[in-house]
Image (cartoon, rainbow, N blue to C red):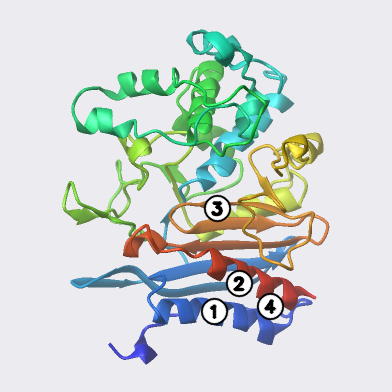
């Protein structure tokens, strides 16, 4: 195919204190990555405060030898670990605002079977800051794939996973910790995680395309494809990429959320407004916003807020220019959010990089795009 036909772009640039030429250079980096087959496609939005400066869609949502589907601004993505900060984190902060929890509550207060041995010392704060001592990952899905365990048995294994170090002794980014937090939330609210997200996050913030298990009860919708599933012989489109999330029927605290750029923009703008939703109502208290952005693990030589990754952390993806007050998160499928409250600058960057295989690394691309966006904001 001729390279001239690779790109499909939608740009809406507002001259609102931005260097338009530089902002287009940020998008040109995505164009180049698409041409070079680093990523199939991307959707992005950039803004300051309550105003969106630019939106972008380029490349392909599906790019296989037999099919090509253009990326669109409303394409929905499997956002992977953005689930942690867009589902579990706001629910935990809402519970804090409501007086239902405190950060130093032991997990065993809500999940009594969890508290054997050193696990009884793990608090909600440990889980939110990845300092619980739980390992990063275990292939729980293999129990179900091998037909040796059902969904409930897998959750039993998750909630009895041995620690790799004492609680509070080190930071290890842990999917298992956020799977556990999802179960804590369900135990407190006596509702499933997906129901709670719909009622307490997505509806109040008018996130109309945010959903777990989006293919359940829906017709055909525009989705960005992820990886080829060897076991089933097809590319995952609208089905969660994370194997552990898939093994528990798509609903988990660490992964499973699908949404589009417009919904994520609504979410980041709520943070930039200090907890205020688009309709002017208070979604989160300013106290919750402040607490989430404190480095709670500075003594462990890491930089973690509640859920969020802060500047200088080992998982910091925000490039060289992003202010030290910045924060954000990434998702394994190729997604990221980045914000800075003092300046009001934010970027939502969505790619489906795993469509070409999970070995594709976009860390440098992500950082350079962030650099150019921040340069364009000056």
Report the residue at 44% width, 17% height from top.
160
Please provide percent x and percent y for residue 121: 63, 14
Query: Considering only order in the chain, which callout, 2 or 4, is on the residue closer to the N terminus?
Result: 4
* Residue 371 in sight here: yes
Distance between mark 2 and mark 1 Cα atoms? 7 Å
In terms of secondary structure, where does tag 3 sit?
strand
Q: Label 3 near label 4: C-beta < 8 Å? A: no
Q: Which residue is mark 1?
A: 29
Left or right position of 310 against 366: right
Q: Which residue is mark 2?
A: 369
Query: Considering only order in the chain, which callout, 1 or 2, is on the residue closer to the N terminus?
Result: 1
The mark tally for this picture is 4
Report the mark closest to the observer, 1 or 4.
1
Q: Label 2 near label 4: C-beta < 8 Å? A: no
Q: Which residue is mark 3?
A: 330
Query: Considering only order in the chain, which callout, 3 or 4, is on the residue closer to the N terminus?
Result: 4
Distance between mark 2 and mark 3 Cα atoms? 14 Å
Query: Considering only order in the chain, which callout, 4 or 1, is on the residue closer to the N terminus?
Result: 4
Report the mark closest to the observer, 4 or 3.
3
Left or right position of 255 against 268: left
Residue 298's quadrant in the figure? top right
Quadrant of the image for the C terminus? Answer: bottom right
Residue 188's quadrant in the figure? top right
In terms of secondary structure, where does tag 1 sit?
helix
Distance between mark 4 and mark 3 Cα atoms? 26 Å
Q: Which residue is mark 4?
A: 14
In terms of secondary structure, where does tag 2 sit?
helix
State whether residue 217 is above or below residue 311. Answer: above
């Amino acid at each position: 195919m001729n390279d001239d036909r690779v790109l499909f772009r939608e740009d809406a640039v507002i001259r609102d204190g931005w260097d338009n030429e530089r902002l287009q250079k940020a998008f040109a980096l995505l164009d180049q990555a698409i041409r070079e087959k680093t990523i199939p496609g991307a959707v992005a939005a950039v803004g300051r405060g309550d105003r969106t400066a630019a939106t972008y869609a380029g490349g392909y949502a599906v790019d296989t030898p037999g099919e090509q589907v253009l990326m669109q601004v409303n394409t929905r993505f499997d956002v992977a670990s953005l689930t942690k900060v867009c589902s579990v984190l706001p629910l935990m902060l809402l519970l804090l605002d409501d007086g239902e929890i405190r950060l130093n509550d032991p997990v065993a207060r809500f999940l009594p079977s969890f508290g054997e041995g050193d696990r009884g010392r793990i608090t909600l704060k440990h889980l939110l800051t990845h300092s619980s001592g739980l390992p990063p990952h275990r292939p729980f899905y293999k129990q179900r794939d091998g037909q040796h365990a059902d969904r409930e048995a897998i959750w039993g294994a998750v909630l009895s996973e041995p620690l790799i170090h004492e609680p509070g002794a080190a930071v290890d980014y842990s999917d298992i910790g956020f799977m556990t937090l999802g179960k804590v939330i369900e135990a407190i609210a006596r509702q499933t995680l997906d129901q709670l997200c719909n009622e307490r996050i997505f509806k109040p913030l008018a996130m109309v395309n945010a959903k777990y298990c989006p293919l359940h009860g829906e017709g055909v919708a525009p989705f960005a494809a992820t990886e080829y599933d060897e076991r089933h012989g097809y590319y995952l489109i609208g089905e969660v990429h994370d194997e552990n999330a898939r093994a528990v029927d798509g609903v988990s605290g660490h992964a499973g959320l699908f949404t589009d750029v417009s919904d994520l923009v609504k979410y980041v703008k709520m943070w930039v407004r200090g907890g205020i939703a688009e309709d002017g109502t208070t979604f989160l208290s300013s106290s919750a916003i402040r607490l989430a952005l404190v480095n709670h693990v500075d003594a462990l030589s890491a930089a973690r807020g509640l859920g969020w990754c802060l500047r200088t952390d080992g998982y910091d993806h925000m490039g060289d220019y992003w202010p030290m007050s910045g924060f954000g998160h990434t998702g394994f499928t190729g997604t990221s959010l980045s914000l800075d409250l003092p300046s009001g600058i934010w970027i939502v960057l969505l790619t489906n990089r795993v469509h070409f295989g999970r070995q594709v690394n976009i860390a440098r691309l992500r950082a350079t795009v962030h650099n150019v966006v921040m340069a364009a904001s000056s």
